């Protein structure tokens, strides 16, 4: 981005930058993992019905990302292209509070419709606009590549520790505060009100800069139709690899989060032990201190590849003694360390895809790439919810029961222990197909010359 790339991004801005992601994706990620548990155990809705409602909402949600991407692509406000939409991270929490406050006087059908509407507004509207604009905003607000990496590393540590503290507290809070239905509303308010305020800070603190050429002059971006945007994306082969990585990874992450609470409740016999396992994630962020240097030396794909190999190995080892809590804890540490690069640096791969797409086709369509990333995450989350609900319904899981049948316990075990191995294999195959690292520096040099 010309001279802008030489300007340093101060530490306080790196912290502020990551707050909306912590509140909208981190905290909501933990809360959404307990949504099925809340709906089945507190409201006594069937797991199959809940799974189907969430799955339909998420599949529908995938299409709204492209619409949001198109709107963002054509945005030209006084605040910039992506910056205005960061406020949707705060809007999301208004609907999250409502989602965990399902009126008890509604009929079963009424409750399912209420859940569908709230869940869709959270994901299809609020988080869609936030996530689709995030990389568009970042690429302009933080032009320096090293600053991008360090900002994401700091964000990884903030998100991991923040989410882990909540993940540790949740099982204990659920078994005490959430015995009554109103407890879930109180929990959502305690988390949601600070989240609404903190998530808005980024908009007021961090300005968006214009895209520039090699001479440091602002470049006028051409507006294109949604059909043209889709064509540019289709002609970029690396988009499909990144989409595959995002979808597969987040399907696995959401499946593990959803089924984990059931696994510890019924297979292990004590949900509060999940808090102890969650504490192991506090060790993993140490890896983030070294990742920016590793990325600089070895490249993004190699670092992600190593991490995903570690994750796969840990999943395989865990399967040999799935009820051994010590082994479960150790392999959880390994899995978390292995997947941290994927969680926090997949955005850098997508930014490379943006540059490659512009170099190849002449059009940048940044929000289109962000839309694909957002759609992949959300459709994966919805399908994971639906898949878990359908499988658990098929094996005879009974909502709110004191115990489950052997068949139901076996189904939960397959989802929590063996499914991650299959997902890990797919992730390794996909990352091994990504070859853009070796070309990207030369591509960026050529792009700066073209932008005149």
Image (tube, rainbow, N blue to C red):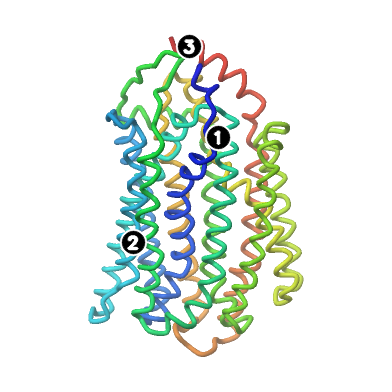
- Of residues 328 and 410, the one nearer the viewer is 328
Q: Is residue 8 above or below residue 28?
A: above
Q: Nearer the viewer, mark 1 or mark 3?
A: 1
- Of residues 417 and 279, the one nearer the viewer is 279
Where residue 326 sits: x, y (%)?
A: 75, 73
Judged left or right of residue 103, residue 381 is right
Quarter placement of the C terminus: top left
Residue at x 30% of width, y 64% of height: 116
Residue at x 42% of width, y 47% of height: 375
Q: Quadrant of residue 274?
A: bottom right
Q: Quadrant of residue 345?
A: top right
Q: Are marks 2 and 3 in contact (CB under 8 Å)?
A: no
Q: Is residue 7 above or below residue 270?
A: above
Q: How far apart are labels 2 and 1 at the CA level? A: 31 Å
Q: Earlier in the sequence, mark 1 or mark 3?
A: 1
Q: Earlier in the sequence, mark 2 or mark 1?
A: 2
Judged left or right of residue 269, residue 359 is left
Dot 1 falls on a residue whose secondary structure is helix
Q: How far apart are labels 1 and 3 at the CA level? A: 23 Å
| Mark 2 lies on residue | 119
| Mark 1 lies on residue | 148
Judged left or right of residue 392, residue 117 is left
- Of residues 90 and 9, the one nearer the viewer is 9
Q: Residues within 10 Å of mark 1 (few under 14, many from 20)?
A: many
Dot 3 falls on a residue whose secondary structure is helix
Q: Nearer the viewer, mark 2 or mark 1?
A: 1
Where residue 397 sits: x, y (%)?
A: 49, 81
| Mark 3 lies on residue | 450
State whether residue 386 appears in this view: no
State whether residue 122 appears in this view: yes
Dot 2 falls on a residue whose secondary structure is helix
């Amino acid at each position: 981005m010309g001279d802008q790339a030489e300007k340093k991004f101060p530490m306080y801005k790196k912290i502020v930058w990551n707050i909306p992601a912590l509140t909208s994706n981190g905290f909501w990620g933990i809360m959404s993992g307990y949504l099925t548990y809340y709906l089945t155990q507190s409201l006594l809705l069937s797991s199959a019905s809940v799974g189907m409602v969430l799955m339909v909402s998420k599949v529908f949600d995938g299409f709204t990302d492209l619409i949001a991407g198109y709107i963002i692509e054509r945005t030209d406000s006084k605040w910039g292209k992506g910056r205005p939409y960061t406020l949707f991270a705060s809007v999301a929490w208004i609907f999250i509070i409502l989602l965990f406050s399902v009126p008890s006087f509604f009929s079963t059908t009424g409750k399912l419709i209420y859940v569908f509407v709230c869940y869709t507004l959270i994901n299809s509207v609020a988080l869609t606009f936030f996530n689709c604009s995030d990389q568009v905003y970042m690429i302009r607000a933080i032009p320096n590549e090293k600053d991008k990496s360090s900002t994401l590393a700091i964000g990884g540590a903030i998100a991991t520790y923040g989410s882990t503290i909540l993940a540790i507290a949740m099982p204990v809070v659920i078994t005490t505060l959430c015995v009554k239905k109103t407890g879930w509303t109180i929990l959502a308010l305690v988390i949601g009100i600070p989240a609404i305020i903190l998530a808005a800070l980024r908009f007021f603190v961090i300005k968006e800069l214009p895209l520039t050429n090699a001479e440091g002059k602002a470049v006028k971006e051409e507006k294109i139709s949604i059909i043209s945007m889709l064509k540019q994306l289709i002609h970029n082969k690396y988009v499909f690899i990144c989409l595959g990585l995002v979808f597969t990874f987040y399907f696995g992450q959401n499946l593990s989060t959803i089924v984990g609470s059931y696994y510890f409740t019924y297979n292990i016999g004590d949900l509060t032990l999940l808090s102890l396992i969650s504490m192991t994630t506090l060790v993993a962020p140490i890896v983030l201190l070294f990742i920016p240097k590793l990325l600089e030396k070895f490249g993004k794909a190699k670092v992600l590849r190593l991490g995903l190999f570690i994750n796969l190995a840990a999943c395989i080892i865990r399967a040999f003694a799935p009820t051994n809590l010590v082994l479960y804890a150790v392999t959880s540490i390994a899995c978390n360390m292995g997947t941290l690069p994927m969680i926090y640096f997949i955005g850098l791969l997508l930014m490379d895809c943006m540059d490659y797409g512009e170099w190849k086709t002449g059009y940048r369509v940044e929000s289109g790439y962000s839309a694909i990333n957002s759609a992949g995450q959300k459709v994966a989350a919805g399908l994971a919810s639906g898949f878990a609900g359908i499988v658990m319904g098929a094996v005879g899981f009974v909502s709110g029961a004191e115990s489950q049948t052997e068949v139901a316990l076996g189904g939960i075990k397959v989802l929590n222990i063996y499914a991650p191995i299959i997902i890990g294999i797919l992730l390794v195959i996909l990352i091994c197909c990504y070859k853009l690292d070796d070309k990207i520096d030369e591509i960026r040099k050529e792009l700066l010359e073209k932008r005149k």
